[in-house]
Image (tube, rainbow, N blue to C red):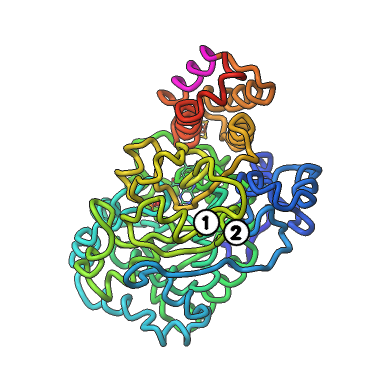
Amino acid sequence: MLKLPLLQVDDSHVEACKSFYTLNDTSLEGKVCQGLACFVARHLKPEVWQQACGQDGKLYCLGKCYDGPAKASDTSRPIMEVHSREPVVMERIMAGGARELATYRKFGGYKALEMVRSKPAEETLALIEASNLRGRGGAGFPAGRKWRAVYQQPAGQKYVVSNADEGDPAAFIDRFIIEDDPHCLIEAMAIAGHVVGATKGYIYLRREYPAAIEILGKALAEARAAGVLGGFELLMFEGHGSYVCGEETALLNSIEGRRAEVRARPPYPTESGLWGRPTLVNNVETFANIPWIIRRGAEAYKQLGFSKSQGTKVLSLNSLFKRPGLYEVEFGMSMRDIVEKIGGGLKSGTLKGLIIGGPLAGVLPPTLLDTKFGFEELRAVGAMVGHGGILAFDQNTSIRQLIHHIAEFAAKESCGKCTPCRRGGERIAQMFGNGDASKLEFNEINAALLSTSLCGLGTGLAEFTITALRHYGEELSSCIK
Ligand SMILES: Cc1cc2nc3c(=O)[nH]c(=O)nc-3n(C[C@H](O)[C@H](O)[C@H](O)COP(=O)(O)O)c2cc1C
Ligand code: SF4
């Protein structure tokens, strides 16, 4: 396994884990993405997709879904806009980025860290709780509650971990936060360390984002040299091509050099995380909200958004939209406005459906476009906010092909710990690949996935296939009996 020079971990188990990862020492040079966002866009650049089909091994998501099917060598940037009353996350990204410490400071960077250091941790915890910031990595768990759970653990070695593994096809949010605003993540993690009592942190990055790794490495070196981190030690860890490593406990096992299988919970990482110590794991975008909340206060934050979904969310729209790109919006917009006003509708053809927040989540058909973008609102119709990638698909993709692609993805990325997930994804892919599925078997696999999966990869596959059958049953009637 390759290591970054900044890495300081015990790697004595690493050789034994190589079979878990798809990239290991493989170069990205000449590679094409085979992720879902590129699959549904294959008609836009058939020659690129042909190359992807003939490629050895699997490469799922380069974070260039705004230009899919995408090559590793593509250097274009997405459209970037702010559609909220004010930006929380994208201010510096919109201004051309703040990669250097001096530029970040011009925007008030590292002031929030100073503010936090000058008051009791309890005050900052109360502020984060009052803001109702919810995790942007998938589950929408209240950030303040998680911070407090780590804070309340007895003093001793604790860790802060940033989940920068962003493996969901159609998501390229964390990629641009890191590439354009790396100090914001560094500042937020130092704040978290100070508040929860952790002296050490890790940022788990994906190997598919080489520019992000390089830029963050430079920013971290600059922050260290300037002494802004104080006694907080922050290290980077590079993943090696495994979607399930985005799941927080698999990620922790990966950092520890173990096979990246998901851990059973409880205990939760807040109590027993890295090397059995209390660990705060948050997504990059969750962290990116923190300095703003500290500088501006919880009330200002709660002015943005609606219902139980406060603040803004950065959305990433895939290449089927007329205006694929990165957009900061307030929660509460209708999905129709996101598709039509922000995305400008589709480049060609008609919208057949949306997959929001990753491939392992419910599908939203056009009949449900009036649903508002919010955690509870999307849940109520079987979909989810997830990480905020908005993937549109059109008539060029049949539902059978979509199920086949997603089930194959889930089968390849399953950590293998739960039998229904290890075998079920493969079986669903087989049934829909052949166009000859048994309804009884399909229902039994889904029921087993929902009731026995240790993580959202297995349950998400079932949620996706169940909603696909619910909304597109007529189209599937010829291949499921
Ligand atoms: C299969 C799977 C993949 C995941 N991938 C990611 C990911 O790439 N990035 C991320 O932040 N969270 C991911 N998550 C969610 C994490 O397990 C965890 O909930 C999150 O990092 C917590 O941070 P938050 O509370 O700030 O959202 C994934 C979950 C599952 C089940
Ligand atoms: S549901 Fe799948 S990926 Fe998740 S723990 Fe079980 S086998 Fe691993």
Between residue 472 and residue 51, name the one nearer to us.
Answer: 472
User: Which one is nearer the viewer's eye here, 16 or 351?
Assistant: 351
> Would you say the residues marked 2 and 1 are in contact, meaning their CB atoms lie under 8 Å apart?
yes
Residue 66: numbered disc: 2
Can residue 189 be seen by looking at this rendering? Answer: no
Name the magenta segment's main secondary structure.
helix
The question of residue 304 being in magenta is answered with no
Q: Which residue is mark 1?
A: 317
Identity, as a three-letter code, of the amino acid under mark 1? Leu
Q: Nearer the viewer, residue 390 or 28?
A: 390
Mark 2, secondary structure of its residue: helix
Q: Which disc, if any, is residue 240?
A: none
- Residue 57 placement, left or right of 259: right
Q: Amino acid at mark 2?
A: Tyr
Question: Quadrant location of residue 319?
Answer: bottom right
Q: Badge 1: few (under 14), some or many (20 or more) residues near its Cα, within 10 Å? A: many
Q: Which residues are magenta?
A: 439-448
Locate residue 189, reporting x and y percent. Answer: 39, 66
